[in-house]
Image (cartoon, rainbow, N blue to C red):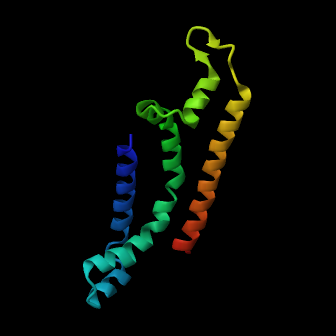
Amino acid sequence: MSLYPIVYIASITAGSLAAQDGKLYLLFAKAKGLSNRVILFRHMLRGSMGTLLTQLPTLLVYILANLLMVEIYRNFPGAAWRLYMAMDFSTYTGTGPDYEAGIIIGITFCFMLLVLIVQWISQIARKYFDPV
């Protein structure tokens, strides 16, 4: 379940680094005699942070979508498990008698608020790392 976000971030990072390859400021840094490691960490990764940070909301939505499976697998009754139990859904009868609308609205609102905060952090961080 954590493999997809890792591969997703790696592909976004590789694409962003490939887009920066051959730019003049990198050629200048190589001409100054900086090592490849210094060029990668100081110049290339800093330049690609804006692209990476715009993907944070997408990753958060993926993590929230898989939260119930992780909680069931790890036997940890968390927020997604409580939301699932509050729905009291049966495939045969539909919504059961223990349907808790207040819990469903509250947990869903918290998840939506979390996504909104991550959106704001992503946009603010992108303006900081990629001011263009």
Question: Which residue is pictured at 36% across the width and 78% down the height?
Answer: 23
Vertical relation: 93 (above or below) 34: above
Residue nearer the viewer, 27 or 35: 35
Residue 96 seen in this snapshot: yes
Picture layout, residue 27 above or below residue 86: below
Is residue 130 among the parts visible in the rendering? no
Using the image, determine if residue 132 lies above or below residue 31: above
**Residue 128 position in % (x across, y down):** 56, 73
Which residue shows up at 69% across the image and 20% down it? Answer: 99
Q: Which quadrant would the N terminus be assigned to in this image?
A: top left
Instruction: Judge whether 110 appears above or below 100 on screen.
Output: below
In which image quadrant can residue 80 be found?
A: top right
In which quadrant of the rendered image does the C terminus lie? bottom right
Q: Position of residue 66 (x, y in %)?
A: 47, 37
127, 112: nearer the viewer: 112
Instruction: Determine the image quadrant of residue 98.
Output: top right
Q: Can you give x and y, in whole percent of width and height, for residue 87 in the image?
A: 63, 23
Please give left or right for residue 5 compared with residue 115 in the image: left
- The residue closer to the viewer here, 99 or 122, is 99
Residue at the outermost bottom position = 32
Seen at 39% across and 57% down, the residue is 12
Identify the residue at horizontal 49%, vertical 55% (top origin).
55
Would residue 106 be found to the left or right of residue 30 on screen?
A: right
**Residue 104 x %, y %:** 67, 31
Q: Is residue 4 left or right of residue 55?
A: left
